Image (cartoon, rainbow, N blue to C red):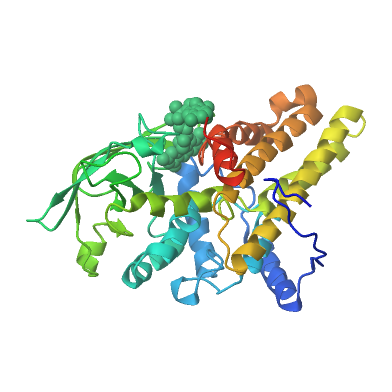
């Protein structure tokens, strides 16, 4: 039987076990009970506004105190040592009950997996507990005014200062989600001035209260204040000697000049498993089904068909994720596969919301959450690397097609 690339692969009969075991059922019951008892009602205002962010932070502290903020992390870092399967269960329950958006997501879902993979033991012990407790709040500093899709074009640089023992950072980052509310930024800086493109870049972690950092918040099209530009004017990051005195002033993740590989680990998390778990879309699909029932009198056959298709797609994404987790548990990295994952979840999110607006008809103009959700869903094909770029990656690296 040929696979996607035309290679012949032996036909296999594999029994897929989709049942949860007793431990997993118990974990689900415990998570559900806690979430149902604690999720704030009414829902919090958007976490991408000043007031809303402060309210979300209180929620993050509550999650941490009950050890639900990072369930799959080791207990020493604030987690429960949960398996990836249990993490998926927690996510399902989290979204099912309509719990608040995770304003800590860029730290716990993007930077943390990279610290687990590339950080020294000292860095893990320093950064991870502070992140799980929502004491350090991280934003992502990839994009620059002339480096978006073409991330390798970053011009922010870090210059070596051997006398002072560290690096001097300068440049500008933009589209930094929640940058105006966060305490720290991770991003790429060119450390080898002679280098080009993907070479000579280094992955830095920088406190935003460092001297020389200016953060200028600005609004999104949907009216929330969620974006910021971050300007770095000779910001000093000392060599990390493992002491609090240097760690509080930032550091380097991975090796100097090897930042591209480290950054790709972060983007794999963003496009693949951790940023957008299936529970989020299954919960939206379940709400869509309820909406369809409430409007059954006016539902056209076409909209009903689209609704069912969107629900099936959310289930398909859950199945796909189970196969991804199986791969990870068996030691295989998703790699470029995370790109078609990202295309799927971002386009699914748009479809789910489009169908909701179709169900609501003219009423949609008056309906807050679905419209707000639709507006945000439209940005899914752009952030985490645009879908055009993901299609290029799938074409070249998964299907092996020529670049031109
Ligand atoms: C909601 C949201 C949150 C974001 N949060 C962050 C954040 O926290 N941190 C951060 O660093 N960035 C963030 N971004 C920025 C995001 O990563 C960039 O917008 C994205 O990478 C695209 O870059 P660009 O906007 O410069 O567009 P460009 O790179 O200028 O692209 C413009 C258009 O050209 C297409 N294009 C470009 N090159 C190619 C090519 N080779 N082949 C085919 N098509 C191509 C693109 O797909 C796009 O449609 C966020 C964006 C959004 C919308």
In the image, 352: left or right of 64? right
* Residue 93 place in picture, x, y as percent: 69, 60
Q: Is residue 326 left or right of residue 288?
A: left
Residue 344 visible in image: yes
- The residue lying furthest to the top in this view is 362
Q: Position of residue 61 (x, y in %)?
A: 48, 61
Identify whether 402 is placed above or below 29.
above
Q: Nearer the viewer, residue 110 or 10?
A: 10
Camera-side residue of 57 and 319:
319
| Residue at x 67%, y 45% (from the top left corner) | 5
Q: Residue at x 27, y 57 (%)?
A: 250
| Rendered view: 122 above or below 92 | below
Q: Nearer the viewer, residue 302 or 225?
A: 302
Q: Residue at x 69, y 47 (%)?
A: 281
Extreme residue in the front direction = 8
Q: Is 276 placed left or right of 27 in the picture?
A: left
Q: Residue at x 21, y 63 (%)?
A: 246
Q: Quadrant of residue 397?
A: top right
Q: Please give the count of numbered marks on the rendered protein.
A: 0
Query: Could you tell me residue 283's position as x and y percent?
Result: 72, 49
Q: Is 305 positioned to the left or the right of 109 in the image?
A: right
Front-most of residues 270 and 368 = 270
Q: Is residue 176 visible?
A: no
């Amino acid at each position: 039987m040929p696979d996607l690339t035309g290679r012949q692969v032996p036909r296999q009969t594999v029994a897929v076990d989709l049942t949860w075991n007793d431990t997993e059922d118990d974990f689900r019951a415990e998570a559900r009970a806690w979430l149902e008892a604690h999720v704030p009602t009414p829902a919090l205002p958007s976490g991408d506004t000043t007031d809303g962010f402060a309210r979300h932070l209180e929620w993050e502290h509550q999650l941490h105190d009950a050890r639900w903020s990072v369930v799959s992390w080791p207990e020493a870092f604030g987690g429960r040592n949960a398996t990836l399967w249990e993490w998926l269960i927690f996510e399902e329950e989290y979204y099912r009950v309509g719990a608040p958006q995770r304003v800590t997501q860029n730290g716990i879902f993007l930077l943390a997996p990279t610290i687990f993979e590339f950080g020294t033991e000292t860095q893990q012990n320093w950064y991870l507990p502070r992140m799980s407790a929502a004491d350090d709040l991280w934003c992502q500093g990839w994009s620059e005014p002339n480096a978006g899709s073409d991330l390798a074009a970053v011009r922010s640089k870090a210059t070596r200062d051997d006398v002072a023992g560290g690096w001097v950072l300068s440049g500008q980052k933009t589209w930094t989600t929640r940058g105006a509310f966060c305490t720290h930024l991770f991003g790429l800086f060119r450390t080898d001035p002679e280098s080009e493109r993907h070479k000579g870049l280094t992955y830095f972690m920088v406190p935003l209260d460092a001297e020389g950092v200016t953060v200028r918040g600005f609004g999104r099209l949907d009216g929330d204040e969620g974006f910021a530009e971050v300007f770095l004017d000779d910001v000093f990051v000392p060599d990390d000697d493992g002491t609090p005195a240097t760690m509080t002033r930032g550091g380097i993740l991975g090796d100097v000049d090897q930042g591209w590989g480290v950054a790709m680990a972060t983007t794999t998390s963003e496009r693949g498993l951790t940023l957008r778990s299936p529970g989020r879309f299954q919960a939206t699909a379940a709400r869509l089904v309820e909406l369809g029932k409430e409007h059954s009198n006016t539902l056209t056959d076409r909209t009903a068909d689209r609704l069912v298709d969107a629900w099936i797609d959310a289930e398909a994404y859950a199945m796909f994720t189970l196969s991804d987790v199986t791969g990870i548990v068996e030691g295989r990295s998703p790699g470029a596969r995370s790109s078609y994952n990202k295309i799927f979840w971002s386009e699914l999110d748009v479809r789910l919301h489009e169908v909701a607006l179709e169900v609501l008809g003219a009423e949609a103009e008056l309906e807050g959450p679905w419209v707000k959700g639709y507006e945000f869903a439209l940005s899914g094909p752009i952030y985490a690397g645009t879908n055009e770029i993901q299609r290029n990656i799938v074409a070249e690296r998964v299907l092996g097609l020529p670049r031109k």
